[in-house]
Amino acid sequence: MNPDLRDSPSVITLDGPAGVGKSTMARRLAASLGVAYLDTGAMYRTLGLGLGAGAADLSDGELRRRCAEYRFSLESCPSNPDSLCLFCNGRMVGDEIRTEKAGRLASLVARLPALREALQSVQRDMGRRWSLVAEGRDMGTRVFPEAQHKFFLDARPEVRAERRCRDLAQRGEAADKAAVLAAIRARDEQDRTRAVDPLRPAPDAHVIDTSDLTPDEVLQSLIHTVRAPAFSHLAADGSLRMVDVGGKGESERVARARGVVEMRAETLDLLRRRALPKGDVLTAAKIAGIMAAKRTWEMIPLCHPLSITYADLRFSIQDEPPAVILESEVRARGATGVEMEALFAVQTAAATIYDMAKAAQKDMIIRDVRLVYKAGGKSGEFTAPG
Ligand code: DC
């Protein structure tokens, strides 16, 4: 088990309609993250088979009492003691629930609020105890609304029918594609339109249409999202947001950035002698860099407009290897730093050098653009190593 996830249980939810490949994905995602896999459909199937269609005629009190007779738990799998499997009353839930009949009955009992509440409470308990990839229909919307990551997998009904037929064929079972498609449509209708906890994506879920993706591509996309660091520019629903700096105090800000434009000795010689056809390269680059510093906020989406008090570019010429070294310096007084301005100034000046000299050489290389120094603000001073 992944120690990061074991220390404080965290839950990833995976919801979606029947036949979308959720189970395979949830199992593989759980295995690659080293956490447990919770198949909540298996719980509804177990109760569907156990209670039968007659469950719908029971009073809420009687239904709750009958549900309590099914004690679900996650325990070491007999085939692999390092993973957890779903058990009911001390016996592992197995393939007996994987029939069409069990699916139909599950969908039927899943409409009963008292039964859903009983299962949801057990599922929440499991989420408090274990780090999980929880798969079902209402994991992100109802059972784990505070889950760290929520996914909703979807696919066109025809694609899901095709996949289900392939699965059945692999298991040696005959499949009538039209009947499978009709069953999938009927189950969709039942799951999406039921009064309690209908199937729908949570507002903050990542919705992935898997119709034209391979299983490996879907898994990569899930893992990529889960492993991506939480940036402050990402709001809870994954959309972009500008950081509110209104409450931050103002201070003097300074930033310096550097970059290199590598070129052949002959090109450098023409530049030095101001003999390139477009004229004085470094003067043009200096003006371009200063303008870029002043307009950075217009080009970098979440950058704040700043009142710049100083911007300049310095150049030095290096003979071995032949290159122009650029250094920008930008200053402002404000609530946010000028690092982006310094970086953007160097990059624009470097691109201008390229533009001015490209008639003489096309394969100049712009490289090593980086922040070398900054001061001011809460994070204080920074000097790049080396
Ligand atoms: O994923 P599955 O096919 O094993 O699910 C069987 C049925 O159980 C499905 O029709 C909807 C229902 N279900 C549900 O309502 N809520 C869940 N969290 C999981 C399954």
Image (tube, rainbow, N blue to C red):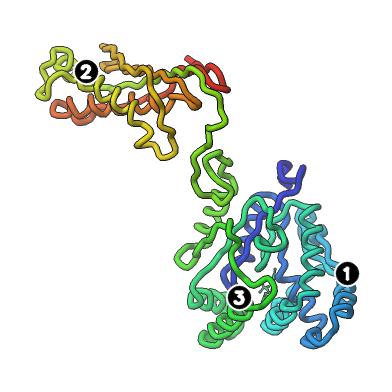
Q: Dot 2: what SS?
A: helix
**Residue behind mark 1:** 89
Image mark for residue 282:
2
Residue 29 falls in image quadrant: bottom right
Report x, y in % for residue 81: 80, 55
Where residue 229 appears, as percent x and y from the top left, is 57, 41
- Quarter of the image holding residue 349? top left
The image shows residue 319, relative to residue 287, as above or below, that is above
> Is residue 249 positioned above or below 194 on the image?
above
Which marked residue is nearer to the observer: mark 3 or mark 1? 3
**Is the residue marked by circle 2 packed among few (<14), some (14-19), or many (20+) residues within 10 Å?**
many
Q: How crowded is mark 1: few (under 14 residues within 10 Å), some or many (20 or more)?
A: few
Q: Residue at x 83, y 62 (%)?
A: 73
- Per the image, label 3 sits on a secondary structure element best described as helix
Q: Name the residue under label 3.
A: 192
- Could you tell me which residue is drawn at 51 percent across and 70 percent down? 155
- For badge 1, the amino acid type reads Asn
In primary-sequence order, the first of circles 3 and 2 is 3
Total numbered labels placed on residues in the image: 3
Mark 1, ligand 1, within 8 Å: the answer is no
Q: Quadrant of ligand 1?
A: bottom right
**In the image, what residue occupies the spot 22% across and 27% down?**
354
**Kind of residue sitting beneath label 2:** Leu
Above or below, 272 against 358 in this view is above
